[in-house]
Image (cartoon, helix red, strand yellow):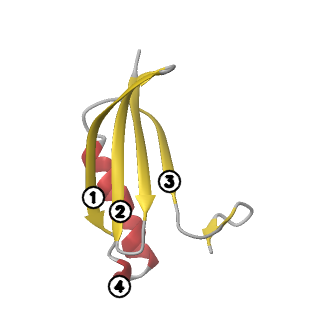
Amino acid sequence: MSGLHIGLDLGGTNIKVAVLAGKGDDFEIIATDSAETGAAGGPDSVTANLIATAREVGQSGQLQTLGLGVPGHFDVDTGQIL
């Protein structure tokens, strides 16, 4: 069974998203979109916008994986974007 795979790219002003369907080595991009980060509202606003963006594009099937690209460094021990 193939599932959905969502990739989110967090930028300074925009969130870009791609949705792929497939499994193994056979994937197809089925949707792309972008949304504002809402950075002026602070970290909670950015987090809410990331979640909303992923939910909007991921409603049409079974989500298998989600990846997030972030600007800068990520502290694995604390889970924080630096």
Q: Are marks 1 and 2 in contact (CB under 8 Å)?
A: yes
Number of the label disc, if any, that sits on residue 15: 2
Please name the amino acid that badge 3 sits on: Leu
Please name the amino acid that badge 1 sits on: Ser
Count neighbours of disc 1 (C-alpha within 10 A) and say few if under 14, some if 14 to 19, many if 20 or more.
some
How far apart, in angstroms, are the residues tagged by discs 4 and 3? 20 Å
Residue 36: give x, y in percent of width and height: 28, 69
Disc with the residue nearer the chain's start (3 vs 2) = 2
How far apart, in angstroms, are the residues tagged by discs 1 and 3? 14 Å
The residue nearer to you, when weighing 35 against 62, is 35
Dot in front, 4 or 2? 2
Please name the amino acid that badge 4 sits on: Ala
Secondary structure beneath dot 4 equals: helix
Quadrant including the N terminus = top left
Horizontal side of 23 relative to 75 (left or right) equals left
How far apart, in angstroms, are the residues tagged by discs 1 and 4? 17 Å
Residue where numbered disc 1 is placed = 34
- In the displayed structure, 25 sits above or below 82; it is above
Outermost residue toward the bottom in this view: 40
The residue nearer to you, when weighing 32 against 3, is 32
Secondary structure beneath dot 3 equals: strand
Q: Residue at x 65, y 63 (%)?
A: 79
Please name the amino acid that badge 2 sits on: Ile
Residue where numbered disc 3 is placed = 68
Q: Are marks 3 and 2 in contact (CB under 8 Å)?
A: no
How far apart, in angstroms, are the residues tagged by discs 4 and 2? 14 Å
Disc with the residue nearer the chain's start (1 vs 2) = 2
How far apart, in angstroms, are the residues tagged by discs 1 and 2? 5 Å
Number of the label disc, if any, that sits on residue 40: 4
Q: Are marks 1 and 4 in contact (CB under 8 Å)?
A: no
Disc with the residue nearer the chain's start (1 vs 4) = 1
